[in-house]
C-alpha cells in the first residue's frame, strides 16, 4: 500500500479498502492467460489493441468490402485465381454425379427391385440434369451450374439459388435452377438497417433469430442501368407446403451470422501485397533488360552516324518529362556530363525463396498444401502423397458440404415433381416424411483423388477389397470415379466377344488356344 492509499484509508477507510480490492483484482487478471496471450503489461502485447464485436459488427458490416476485394484478387492476382480454381476443379470437377441409394429395407424392396428403381430414377434425373433446360437462363446444365455456384460462393462468400417452376416444350419437368449473385441480396433501405437489425444484408430474421426471408434486388445494386432498383421479399420456405424457395450456400464461422465470408478473406492483404511485389519485380526485370550505355564526348563530336539521336521531326510533340529506354541503346552526352552507373540487381535472387515462404502461409490458411497450390511436386513420393492426402481431406469436406447444400435439396425437389407427375412410382412419398427420406437418399460422386504411382494405388485397393475394408464399388469410384456395375456389364460383354474371336489370354498375356480351335486343327490332321 503506497502513501496515497495510506492517506485515503486514514480519512476514508471504505474508499481505501475499495482501492486495495481493485488493485488485487488487477493482479488476478494478470494470472493465467493474463500472463500470456491476454497480457496487458508485456511489451510485445501493449501495442496489440483489439475490439471484438458481435457477428454483425465483425462480419456483416465488412462483407461488401471483402467481397469486392476478393473478386479483384481473382481477376488480377494469379495466385488467388489458381487457388480458387484448384478448389473448384478438385471439389466439383466435371460435376457431382447422382448415385441413388434408397433404403430398400424400410421400403420393403428386394435388392433387385431397389436396383431397378434406382436405375430408373437416375435415368429420369439425367434427362433433366444433362439439359440446359434445367437452368432458368438456358445456358448451363446441372453440372455446369454446380461449378458456377461453387466458384461464386468462394469469391463472394455465399450465393443463392431459387427453384422456380417454368414449363418448357419437350421437357417433362418444370423445375428450374436460378442462381442469384450475392450482391443482389441486400437491404432495401440502408439507413433503416443501421438501426433495426431485423433485416441485415438482405437477410430477414424473426424474433427468435430464425431466417424467414430474403430481400432480392431486381438488378445488381452497382449496375449502371438507369432503371430504379426494386426489391422482392421471398420467404425461405413456402407457408403451405414447406417447400424450400431459396437455397443459401454459406459456410458459417460464428453463431448468429447471416452472410458468408469469401474464402480468400484471411489472406486478402497478403495476396495483394504479394501481387504488388511480383509486379514490381517483373517491372524491374523488364527495365533491367532495357539497360542503356552512356558515353561522354567532346562537344564538337558528331554522333549522328551512330543513329542514336532521333531527328528533330521525330522529337516534335514528345513529352520532355519522360525518358524512354530501348534495347541496345547508346546515348551521347555533352562534355562535362556524367552518369553514375547503378546495377539494378534484377532478377532478385531472393525472390523465389520469399514468394515460396509466403505461398506456404497462404496455403496453410486455405487448407491447400503448397505442393497442390503451386502444382509443384518436386519432393519425394512420400512428401507429395502426404500433401495430396492432406488436401483431399479438405476437398472431401467441401464436396460433402456442396452435396448437402446444393445437389441433394435440388434432387429432392426433382424427385417430388417426378412422383407427383407419375413418372416415378413411390408409394407413401407425400404422406410419410420417413418414407420420403428413404426414397430420396443418394450419394454424390465427384472426381477421384488421382494417383502419383498407379501401380501402388491399385495394389493397395486390391488388398483393401480382399480384406473386406472396402468394396469394389467404392474403389472404382475412388480410383477413377466410375461405376463398377456398369464396368462389370461391359467386361462380361467384352470377354464373351474375346472368346468368340479366339483372343483369350493367360496370366502372362499370351494367347491361349481354345478347345474349338484345337478340335479344328486335329480334324485337319
Image: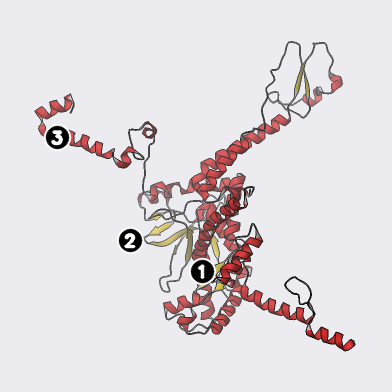
Name the mark nearer the viewer: 1 or 3. 3
Disc 3 and disc 2 in contact, CB within 8 angstroms: no
Q: Is residue 391 left or right of residue 232?
A: right
In the image, which disc is placed on residue 497? none
Report, in whole angstroms, how far the alpha carbon at label 3 lies from the one at label 2. 45 Å
Q: At which x and y percent is residue 516?
A: 80, 86
- In the rendered view of the protein, which quadrant contains the C terminus? bottom right
Residue shown at the point (14%, 34%) measured from the top left:
17
Residue beneath label 1, please? 408
Q: Examine the rendered structure and indicate whether residue 138 appears above or below residue 72.
A: below
Camera sees residue 140:
no
Residue beneath label 3, please? 17
User: Along the line of sight, which residue is nearer the eye, 140 or 400?
Assistant: 400
- In the rendered view of the protein, which quadrant contains the N terminus? top left
Residue shown at the point (59%, 80%) measured from the top left:
120
User: Along the line of sight, which residue is nearer the eye, 25 or 336?
Assistant: 25
Earlier sequence position, callout 3 versus callout 2: 3
Residue beneath label 2, please? 208
Amino acid at each position: 500500500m503506497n502513501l496515497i492509499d495510506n492517506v485515503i484509508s486514514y480519512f476514508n477507510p471504505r474508499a481505501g479498502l475499495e482501492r486495495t480490492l481493485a488493485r488485487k483484482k488487477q493482479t488476478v487478471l494478470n494470472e493465467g492467460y493474463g500472463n500470456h496471450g491476454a497480457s496487458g503489461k508485456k511489451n510485445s502485447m501493449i501495442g496489440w489493441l483489439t475490439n471484438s464485436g458481435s457477428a454483425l459488427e465483425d462480419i456483416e458490416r465488412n462483407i461488401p468490402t471483402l467481397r469486392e476485394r476478393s473478386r479483384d484478387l481473382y481477376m488480377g492476382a494469379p495466385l488467388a485465381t489458381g487457388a480458387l480454381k484448384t478448389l473448384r476443379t478438385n471439389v466439383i470437377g466435371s460435376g457431382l454425379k447422382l448415385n441413388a441409394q434408397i433404403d430398400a429395407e424400410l421400403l420393403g424392396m428386394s435388392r433387385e427391385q431397389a436396383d431397378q428403381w434406382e436405375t430408373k430414377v437416375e435415368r429420369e434425373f439425367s434427362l433433366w440434369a444433362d439439359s440446359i433446360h434445367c437452368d432458368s437462363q438456358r445456358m448451363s446444365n446441372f453440372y455446369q451450374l454446380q461449378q458456377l455456384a461453387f466458384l461464386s460462393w468462394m469469391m463472394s462468400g455465399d450465393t443463392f439459388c431459387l427453384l422456380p417452376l417454368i414449363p418448357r416444350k419437350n421437357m417433362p419437368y418444370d423445375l428450374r435452377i436460378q442462381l442469384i449473385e450475392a450482391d443482389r441480396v441486400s437491404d432495401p433501405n440502408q439507413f433503416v438497417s443501421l438501426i433495426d437489425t431485423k433485416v441485415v444484408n438482405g437477410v430477414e430474421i424473426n424474433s427468435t433469430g430464425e431466417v424467414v426471408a430474403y430481400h432480392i434486388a431486381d438488378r445488381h445494386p452497382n449496375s449502371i442501368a438507369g432503371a430504379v432498383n426494386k426489391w422482392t421479399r421471398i420467404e425461405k420456405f413456402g407457408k403451405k407446403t414447406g417447400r424450400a424457395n431459396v437455397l443459401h450456400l454459406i459456410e458459417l464461422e460464428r453463431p448468429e451470422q447471416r452472410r458468408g465470408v469469401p474464402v480468400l478473406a484471411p489472406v486478402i492483404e497478403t495476396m495483394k501485397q504479394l501481387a504488388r511485389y511480383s509486379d514490381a519485380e517483373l517491372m524491374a526485370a523488364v527495365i533491367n533488360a532495357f539497360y542503356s550505355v552512356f558515353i561522354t564526348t567532346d562537344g564538337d563530336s558528331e554522333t549522328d552516324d551512330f543513329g542514336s539521336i532521333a531527328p528533330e521531326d521525330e522529337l516534335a510533340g514528345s513529352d520532355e518529362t519522360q525518358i524512354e529506354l530501348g534495347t541496345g541503346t547508346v546515348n551521347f552526352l555533352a562534355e562535362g556530363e556524367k552518369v553514375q552507373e547503378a546495377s539494378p540487381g534484377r532478377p532478385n535472387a531472393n525472390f523465389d525463396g520469399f514468394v515460396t515462404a509466403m505461398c506456404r502461409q497462404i496455403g496453410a490458411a486455405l487448407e491447400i498444401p503448397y505442393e497442390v497450390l503451386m502444382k509443384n511436386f518436386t519432393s519425394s513420393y512420400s512428401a507429395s502423397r502426404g500433401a495430396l492426402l492432406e488436401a483431399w481431406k479438405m476437398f472431401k469436406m467441401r464436396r460433402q458440404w456442396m452435396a448437402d447444400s446444393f445437389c441433394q435439396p435440388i434432387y429432392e425437389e426433382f424427385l417430388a415433381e417426378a412422383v407427383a407427375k407419375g413418372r416415378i412410382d413411390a408409394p407413401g412419398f407425400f404422406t410419410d416424411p420417413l418414407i420420403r427420406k428413404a426414397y430420396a437418399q443418394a450419394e454424390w460422386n465427384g472426381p477421384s483423388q488421382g494417383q502419383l504411382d498407379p501401380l501402388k494405388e491399385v495394389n493397395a485397393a486390391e488388398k483393401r477389397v480382399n480384406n473386406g475394408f472396402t468394396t469394389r464399388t467404392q474403389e472404382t469410384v475412388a480410383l477413377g470415379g466410375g461405376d463398377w456395375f456398369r464396368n462389370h456389364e461391359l467386361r462380361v460383354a467384352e470377354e464373351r466377344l474375346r472368346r468368340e474371336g479366339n483372343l483369350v489370354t493367360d496370366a502372362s498375356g499370351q494367347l491361349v488356344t481354345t478347345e474349338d480351335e484345337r478340335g479344328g486343327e486335329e480334324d485337319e490332321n
